[in-house]
Amino acid sequence: MGVVNVTPDSFSDGGRWFDTTVAVKHGLDLVAEGADLVDVGGESTRPGATRVDEAEELRRVIPVVRGLASEGVVVSVDTMRASVAEQALAAGAALVNDVSGGLADPAMIPVVAATGAPFVVMHWRGFLQGGNVKGVYEDVVAEVMDELHARVEAVLEGGIAPDRIVVDPGLGFSKEGEHDLTLLAHLDRLHALGHPLLVAASRKRFLGRVLAGPEAAPPPARERDAATAAVSALAAHAGAWAVRVHEVRATADAVRVARAVEGAR
Ligand code: PMM
């Protein structure tokens, strides 16, 4: 899954794909590099970001979704708003990716259920607990699994079919670097949730920390793509359904190698 952030302020690639034509071109480039689907988002979720209003999010996202879908690209829309999901699906999106797991907008689950589109349910205590809370965990894997399980139950109750649900541990969302690493080390356990797994480590803070060590300043987001590809190989090896990344080429290679190694077992 390649990422196109149509935002002026994303932490990892803020501002680069803000113009519709440039964003569509970037999405097509990601497909040429090996992406099977492209995730289009118009709202930054970096810590401290203020929410964009609905009209602005629609203005950013819908033309890019339409442009990519009309070129045959499988598009996912990264949004916490039901109206954006609905219009994106009408414009040709195939999948809805909601970092709030359906909690930000009560209309989200019914809208997605009515269309039959697949729905990515991500773990984020910020929305479970009504604020961008810091994650404090005794057993991060067990707690993330329990909380994701509860969200999946709610999504099922809302009418989304079981075979339409994808789960995502939400790396970096209400989590410290150590939590992200522990989750990655135990991805195999997340399969017990019974749904395909999306892993989105791309350029995230914890990778900067791993690369820099405890003392030095972390490298900027755009210098974390080799580290991202390493996680992609590990995630593919652990049986992830998809990895969400900003730079596709290295990850596509990493996933191919992981598959070839699997095939040689
Ligand atoms: N992370 C970001 C945005 N959308 N969606 C899912 N499903 N999972 C994630 O971890 C996730 C996401 C933030 O990253 P970005 O601003 O660099 O795109």
Image: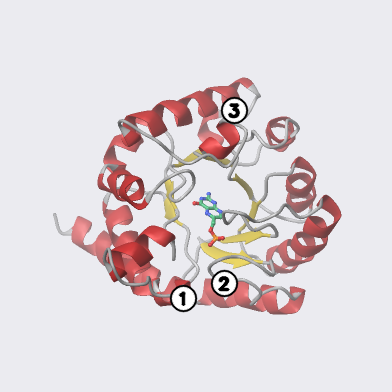
Q: Name the side, left or right, on which 31 lies relative to 255.
A: right
Q: For marks 3 and 2, give the one nearer the viewer.
A: 2
Q: Amino acid at mark 3?
A: Val
Alpha-carbon span between mark 3 and mark 2: 31 Å
Residue, disc 2: 13
Residue, disc 3: 155
Does the closest atom of ligand 1 sit within 8 Å of the Cβ of label 2? yes
Q: Earlier in the sequence, mark 3 or mark 1?
A: 3
Asked whether 17 or 160 is in front, the reply is: 17
Residue in the image at 37% along x and 72% along y: 217
Label 2: element kind: loop
- Residue 81 is situated, as x and y percent measured from the top left of the image, at 73, 44
Q: Amino acid at mark 2?
A: Asp
Asked whether 38 or 230 is in front, the reply is: 230
**Can you tell which quarter of the image residue 218 is in?**
bottom left
Q: Give the crowd class for mark 2: few <14, some 14-19, many >=20 residues within 10 Å.
A: some
Q: Name the side, left or right, on which 249 lies relative to 157.
A: left
Q: Is residue 6 visible?
A: yes
- Residue 130 is situated, as x and y percent measured from the top left of the image, at 62, 33
Residue furthest front in the image = 215
Residue, disc 1: 222
Asked whether the residues under the numbered discs 2 and 1 touch, taking CB atoms below 8 Å apart as contact, a structural biologist would say yes
Label 1: element kind: helix
Label 3: element kind: helix
Q: Earlier in the sequence, mark 2 or mark 1?
A: 2
